[in-house]
């Protein structure tokens, strides 16, 4: 009972952590790598989206949107000169190249890599971590059955059998924990990406109204 309580408790020091990693088998190390990579990329994405959608930049986005709809080129240029975020970059392209459908699509595709950065890593981790956990479960059960089958089921130390079962349980729980810890940031970042794409579409629609599909050099 005391051993069970130990393994369901949180590790208190590095030696406890290493003991659990050893108990879970080799599958734990790829899962640890996935969790560290996902955590690092999640920090980068959190900073990116906070920086893009902080109040000052949202206000500038709204000012650019109004200026585009009104066709106020001088005001747009003064607004986008103060920043280089996604919205300012697209507004600059609209001013320089026009706002017809082909150019608008090209503009969105040019900024999409910045919006979708690391999303494939998160989705891969969400899928791969539980699969690695299942793999650890299978190898742990195989280990236990090998011990039982090797001596005909008799004279086996229960602690040796429980080692394989413990590996199976630890890897399953770890895989699910890594997947869940990645899923929630992934969903948040996906929502932020959809919001950014919606705002880009609003800027394009405003540019079509205020600037027209082709740049009018005579208005400069």
Image (cartoon, rainbow, N blue to C red):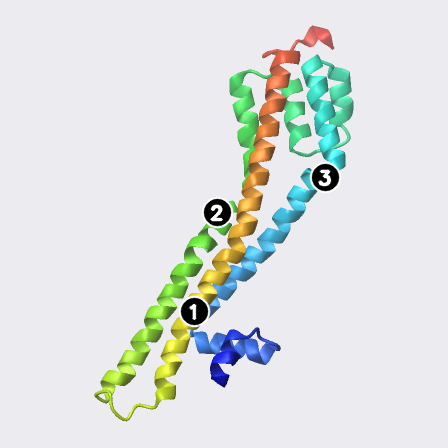
Q: Position of residue 24 (x, y in %)?
A: 44, 74
Secondary structure, mark 3, is: loop
What residue did someone put label 1 on?
Answer: 171
Mark 2 surroundings: few (<14), some (14-19) or many (≥20) residues within 10 A: few
Residue extending farthest to the bottom is 155
Calculate the distance from the C-alpha at mark 2 to the C-alpha at mark 1.
Answer: 23 Å
Q: Is residue 112 above or below residue 162?
A: above
Determine whether the residue tagged by mark 2 lies in a helix, strand or loop.
helix
**Mark 2 and mark 3: Cα distance apart in space:** 25 Å
Based on the displayed image, in which of its 4 quarters is residue 127 positioned? bottom left
Where on the picture, by quarter, is residue 144?
bottom left
Few, some or many C-alpha atoms within 10 Å of disc 3 (few <14, some 14-19, many ≥20)?
Answer: few
Task: Using a 10 Å C-alpha cutoff, classify the residue at mark 1 as few (fewer than 14 neighbours), some (14 to 19) or many (20 or more).
Answer: many
Q: Quadrant of residue 204?
A: top right
| Residue 100 image offset from top left, x and y in percent | 55, 15
| For residue 179, above or below residue 153 | above
Outermost residue to the top: 218
Element class at badge 1: helix
Please say if the residues under marks 2 and 1 sit with CB atoms less than 8 Å apart. Answer: no
- Name the residue carrying label 2: 120
- What separation in Å lies between label 3 and label 1 (alpha carbons)? 39 Å
Q: Residue at x 56, y 22 (%)?
A: 104
Mark 2 vs mark 3: give the one in front: 3
Q: Identify the residue position indicated by label 3 in the image.
A: 54
Q: Residue furthest front?
A: 1
Looking at marks 2 and 1 on the same chain, the residue that comes earlier in the sequence is marked by 2
Name the side, left or right, on which 19 lies relative to 63: left
């Amino acid at each position: 009972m005391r051993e069970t309580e130990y393994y369901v408790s949180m590790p208190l020091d590095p030696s406890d952590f290493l003991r659990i990693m050893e108990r879970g088998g080799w599958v734990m190390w790829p899962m640890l790598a996935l969790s560290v990579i996902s955590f690092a990329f999640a920090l980068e994405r959190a900073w990116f989206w906070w920086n893009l959608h902080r109040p000052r930049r949202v206000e500038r986005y709204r000012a650019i949107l109004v200026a585009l709809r009104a066709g106020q080129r001088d005001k747009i240029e003064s607004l986008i000169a103060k920043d280089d975020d996604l919205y300012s970059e697209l507004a600059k392209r609209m001013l320089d190249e026009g706002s017809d459908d082909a150019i608008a699509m090209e503009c969105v595709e040019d900024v999409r890599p910045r919006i979708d950065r690391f999303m494939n890593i998160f989705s891969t981790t969400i899928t791969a971590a539980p699969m690695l956990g299942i793999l650890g479960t299978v190898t742990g059960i195989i280990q236990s059955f090998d011990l039982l089958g090797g001596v005909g089921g008799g004279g086996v130390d229960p602690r040796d059998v429980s080692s394989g079962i413990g590996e199976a349980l630890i890897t399953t729980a770890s895989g699910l924990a890594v997947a869940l810890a990645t899923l929630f940031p992934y969903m948040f970042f996906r929502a932020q990406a959809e919001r950014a794409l919606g705002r880009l579409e609003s800027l394009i629609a405003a540019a079509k109204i205020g600037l027209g599909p082709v740049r009018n050099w005579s208005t400069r």
